[in-house]
Amino acid sequence: MRNVKDLYMALIFFIIIVINGISAEKKQDYKVLIGMDHKKVMQLKEIKTLVIDAEFFSEEEIAHLHANGNTNILSYLNIGSIETFRDDYKEFEEITLGDYENWDEEKWVNVADKRWQKRIKNKAQLLLQKGIDGFFLDNADVYYQYQTPAIYQGLMSILREIHQEHKPIIINGGDTFITEAIKQNAISGIVTGVNQESVFTEIHFKTNTFGAKPAEDRAYFMEYLAQCKTYGLTVYLLEYGANKKLEKEIKAYCERNGFIYDISHSLQLDKAF
């Protein structure tokens, strides 16, 4: 009888291990879902690094997402441009610099303006009060569009202010700015990582479709990301609409280099799969 009981207990233990193993395998490393419907976001579970726009979520909702097993919740924060749907757009319209190509509801902003820097600082602090774990900062590409010392220093001022909150900072895009900042050794200990969109894929905005990026363009980003890795930055990739063949290439490349990736099949970043 005891042998049967021992066998039974061993079987239960084995089943628990298997279930835990399956759960661990299901846990996704990285998802960027800043365009996902609010109700759908609240159902997300077991994501190691989840990027949302926390401006539209309460402190209680962030706590709920953490309770769902989402480990690191980063908030999107646009530091280099402003969307016309933001409540305070009219207040900052006069410091916009120009239209944002392919994004009709967005304008580049003069990040050197002290009012803008104060806005970003205040927004970062409000987001932190909701319980987020870090920041996903977008549109440092304003420096690519307007390559002046004032714009560069404006971005650096913003980063230094946010860094005072002692939370991880991931820069989305901004390769021209990041390259210059690495050259000047200006972001060591400030920026945690970079997220690069469309290394292997490209977006055809006119037809709202996706394709494979040409080899020469891909090579540029691979060299850039290798530089970021050498500098000590964590590297993330966000790809769009990759087919099965490209998915395998992306996975193999990231595994070789220790990079983390997400493949979205929606330009709006509103679908988990």
Image (spheres, rainbow, N blue to C red):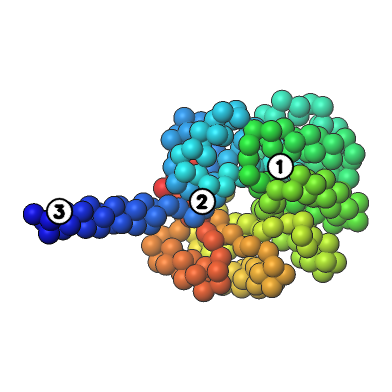
Position above or below: 121 against 200: above
Q: Earlier in the sequence, mark 3 or mark 2?
A: 3
Q: Earlier in the sequence, mark 3 or mark 1?
A: 3
Position above or below: 160 against 58: below
- Residue at the (76%, 29%) spot, across then down: 89
In the rendered image, which residue does mark 2 sit on? 48
Of tags 1 and 2, which is closer to the observer? 2
**Secondary element type, mark 1:** strand
Question: In what quadrant of the picture does the N terminus appear?
Answer: bottom left
- Residue at the (69%, 41%) spot, across then down: 77
Q: Whole-Å distance between the Cαs marked 3 and 2?
A: 38 Å
Of tags 3 and 2, which is closer to the observer? 3
**Badge 2 amino acid:** Lys
**Secondary element type, mark 2:** strand
Of tags 3 and 1, which is closer to the observer? 3
Tell me, yes or no, if residue 251 can be seen here: yes
In the rendered image, which residue does mark 3 sit on? 5
Point out residue 229 in the picture as x, y percentages from the top left corner: 66, 69
* Residue at the extreme left: 1
In the rendered image, which residue does mark 1 sit on? 78
Mark 1 crowd level (few <14, some 14–19, many ≥20, 10 Å Cα): some
Position above or below: 90 against 209: above
| Quarter of the figure with residue 8 | bottom left
**Residue closest to the eye, 258 or 210:** 258
**Residue closest to the eye, 149 or 252:** 252
Point out residue 58 in the picture as x, y percentages from the top left corner: 60, 28
**Badge 1 amino acid:** Asn
**Badge 3 amino acid:** Lys
Residue 62 is left or right of residue 174, and the answer is: left
